[in-house]
């Protein structure tokens, strides 16, 4: 399963390549998902009701993975490791990573600088 980060979903919606073409190619495989954190981030950025409806239509075919207690445990472990190294990350990024780690999913993000710090998190490349 490949989890789409918010930055990638924004690029897909804007028609940016390689993201948009990659998304259109993989969507029928049903291997694409996002997290409840990313779902929130995307919808929180809507400026109008029409824009929110467009975003909900985009999100509809994606599985939305929850931030449950097991994912929270994984996120907390990653947070503690990074804090010890003096390289903390925002809580939202840690929550996204915790979900991916718990489910064994890969994350597709442009924010590799943040997420590559997390041990065991697989990062996906488009294409």
Image: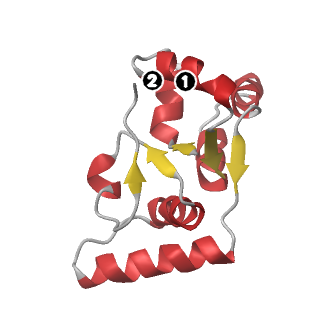
Residue 115, disc: none
| In the image, residue 51 above or below residue 87 | above
Residue 31 point in image, percent of width and height: 63, 38
Q: Quadrant of the N terminus?
A: top right
Q: Residue furthest left?
A: 86
Residue 54 point in image, percent of width and height: 72, 23
Please say if the residues under marks 2 and 1 sit with CB atoms less than 8 Å apart.
Answer: yes
Q: Is 16 on the left-hand or right-hand side of 118?
A: right
Visual colour scheme: secondary structure
Q: Quadrant of the C terminus?
A: top left
When asked about the image quadrant of residue 27, the answer is top right
Q: Is 91 on the left-hand or right-hand side of 57?
A: left
Residue 23, disc: 1
Residue 7 point in image, percent of width and height: 45, 37
Residue 19, disc: 2
| In the image, residue 85 above or below residue 26 | below
Q: Dot 1: few (<14), some (14–19), or many (≥20) neighbours within 10 Å?
A: some
Q: Dot 2: few (<14), some (14–19), or many (≥20) neighbours within 10 Å?
A: many
Could you say which is closer to the camera, residue 124 or residue 54? Answer: 124
When asked about the image quadrant of residue 70, the answer is bottom right
| In the image, residue 24 above or below residue 125 | above
Residue 49 point in image, percent of width and height: 77, 28
């Amino acid at each position: 399963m490949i989890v789409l980060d918010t930055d990638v979903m924004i690029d897909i919606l804007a028609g940016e390549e390689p993201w948009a073409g990659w998304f259109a190619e993989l969507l029928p495989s049903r291997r694409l998902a996002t997290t409840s954190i990313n779902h929130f981030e995307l919808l929180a950025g809507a400026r109008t009701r029409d824009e929110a409806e467009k975003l909900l239509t985009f999100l509809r075919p994606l599985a939305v993975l929850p931030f449950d207690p097991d994912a929270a445990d994984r996120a907390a472990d990653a947070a503690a490791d990074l804090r010890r190294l003096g390289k903390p990350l925002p809580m939202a990024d840690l929550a996204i990573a915790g979900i991916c780690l718990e489910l064994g999913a890969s994350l597709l993000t442009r924010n590799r600088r943040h997420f590559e710090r997390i041990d065991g998190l697989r990062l996906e490349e488009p294409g």
